[in-house]
Amino acid sequence: MTEHRIFSTSFGSVYVHYVAKAERKGRTREEVDRVIGWLTGYDAEAIARIVADETDFRTFFAEAPRMNPHANLITGVICGIRVEEIEDPLMQRIRYLDKLVDEVARGKKMTSILRGTPA
């Protein structure tokens, strides 16, 4: 079985799209960074460094300071697939991130996006 190409895609090449999507809907880069930080433990400075270094998604998640133990509370459909049913752990983390950014762009309250847990 071949590996999905998103695993070797640079995080920064997708991050710019996350930010653009949020900003088109009146949200901010800071809000995108906040949900990324909630999920992974990275702060805004680390995210900027990862983008500049062209770190791929595999490394981005492998080196995450702290994956949020409440990430399993992220449910719903992204790209036609229920995130809670994705079997590959790396793909599931990527889709968790996609789902969080979608929720930011849709204007959900931050407390709801962060599943009622501290950022």
Image: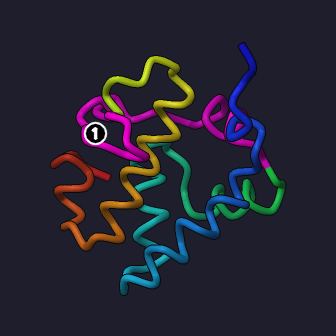
Q: Does the magenta stretch include residue 47?
A: no
Q: Indicate whether 25 appears above or below 12.
A: below
Q: Decide which of 41, 25 is in the foreground and name it.
A: 25
Residue drawn at (82%, 54%), measured in percent from left and top? 54
Q: The magenta stretch spans which residues?
A: 55-82
Identify the image quadrant of residue 50: bottom right
Task: Give the image's coloring scheme.
Answer: rainbow
Circle 1: element type: loop
Q: In this view, does 103 lie to the left or right of 57?
A: left
**Looking at this rendering, what residue extends furthest in the right direction?**
53
Q: Indicate whether 51 appears above or below 19.
A: above
Q: In this view, does 35 lie to the left or right of 113?
A: right
Estimate the x, y position of residue 96 in percent, counting from the top left: 41, 41
Q: Quadrant of the N terminus?
A: top right
Q: Is residue 67 left or right of residue 114?
A: right
Residue drawn at (42%, 24%), measured in percent from left and top? 86
Q: Mark 1 points at which residue?
A: 74
Residue drawn at (46%, 52%), measured in percent from left and top? 37
**Looking at this rendering, what residue extends furthest in the front direction?**
80
Q: Does the magenta stretch include residue 74?
A: yes
Estimate the x, y position of residue 42 in percent, counting from the top left: 55, 49
Q: How many labels does the image show?
A: 1
Q: Is residue 71 left or right of residue 112?
A: right
Estimate the x, y position of residue 51 in percent, counting from the top left: 73, 60
- Decide: few, some or many residues near mark 1? Use Cα within 10 Å; few <14, some 14-19, many ≥20: some
Q: Decide which of 38, 23 is in the foreground and name it.
A: 23
Estimate the x, y position of residue 84 in percent, counting from the top left: 31, 28
Identify the image quadrant of residue 25: bottom left
Q: Which amino acid lies under the numbered mark 1 shown in the image of this protein? A: Ile
**Looking at this rendering, what residue extends furthest in the top direction?**
1
